[in-house]
Amino acid sequence: MTPYSAVDAPLLFALGHSQPLGKLVTQRLGVALTPHEERVFDDGEHKIRPLQSVRGRDCFVLHSLFGEPAQTVNDKLNRLLFFIATLKDAAATNVTAVLPYLAYARKDRRTQQDDPVTLRYVAQLFEAVGTDSVVVLEVHNPAALQNAFRCRAESLNSSELFARHLQQQLTGSPCVVVSPDSGGVKRADLFRQCLSSALGREIALGFTEKFRHAGVLSGELLAGEVCGHHVLLFDDLISSGQTFLRAARMCRQHGAAAVWAVASHGLFNTNAADSLSDSVIERIFITDSVPLPAATASALANKLEVVSCAPLLADAISHSAGD
């Protein structure tokens, strides 16, 4: 990637725990993170301000909106929104929110009477503070993202990133890509296409049936041939791990030779490490869109591999800055 000159370089900020990923992105762009100040006051209020002028500049703010003990999803969203508003008040020309993980993206429709459509409400908040565009990695439903936002909204897909990474490890193995949920078949098929191109041979596609009622998973159907195949379970995120574990067991029962789990976002919520430690899943691949908890990294050290999403984010920023 061609480094920018000091004059035309976009200004890239990375807030809170997203700074390590932000530094990887700036290395790809050939620039440095733009300095800023983050302060928390005794009463819990906070402020974030840039430490260099943003007047007339294109600004990108990288912040992954995931929950953790130190800061909730809502804490992070609030700080990001305030900072974007601050940049606009300081005469930044354009401000783009770069979101490796977007909270509330799964709540994109009503599933019960009078349910909230929270993704749309989040979009309205971004627009209210003057956000010019958003870039999101592997959003749950790209079409819903486009419908929710009136400003420019770009969804990045991790399929090619994972396909390139796994290419050498799957040479010669009969493979099949399986979505652990029928709703994710389109996402899995895109990964299948990228993997087929990387390996130079056709890869099959399948899916498992999943129903959720009151937090309980059910469904017994497995569509696709997995017997004797290397199964790649592909989805947008790993939360509790139960969906992946259940699909892996179904594939093993139908004769799968090996099962690997591949997902962009490793949220690893309560007891996820225990579920994913089960030997039916041999390996797990995620990106660094969400920092990996130390306890999870330790518990899954023998099977977990992190593929950086920094190249995807850097390319998106480079293209946006050139528009």
Image (cartoon, rainbow, N blue to C red):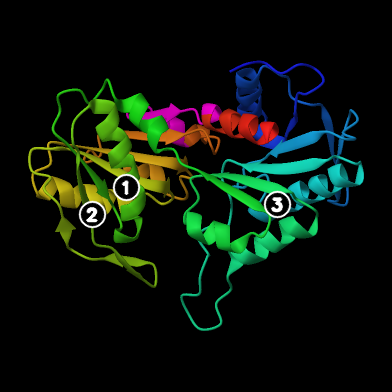
- Picture coordinates of residue 293 (x, y %)? 52, 36
Residue corresponding to mark 3: 77
Tell me whether the residue at label 2 lies in contact with that at label 1, contact meaning CB atoms closer than 8 angstroms.
yes
Q: CA distance from mark 2 to mark 1?
A: 9 Å
Residue corresponding to mark 1: 188
| Left or right position of 249 against 291 | left
Residue corresponding to mark 2: 207
Q: Is residue 60 visible?
A: yes
Q: Is residue 275 visible?
A: no
Query: Which comes sooner in the sequence, label 2 or label 1?
Result: 1
Question: Callout 2 environment at 10 Å: few (<14), some (14 to 19), or many (20+)?
Answer: many
Q: Residue furthest bottom?
A: 113
Q: Residue at x 46, y 41 (%)?
A: 157
| Left or right position of 33 against 50 | left
**Mark 3 against mark 1, which lies toward the viewer?**
1
**Magenta region:** 296-311
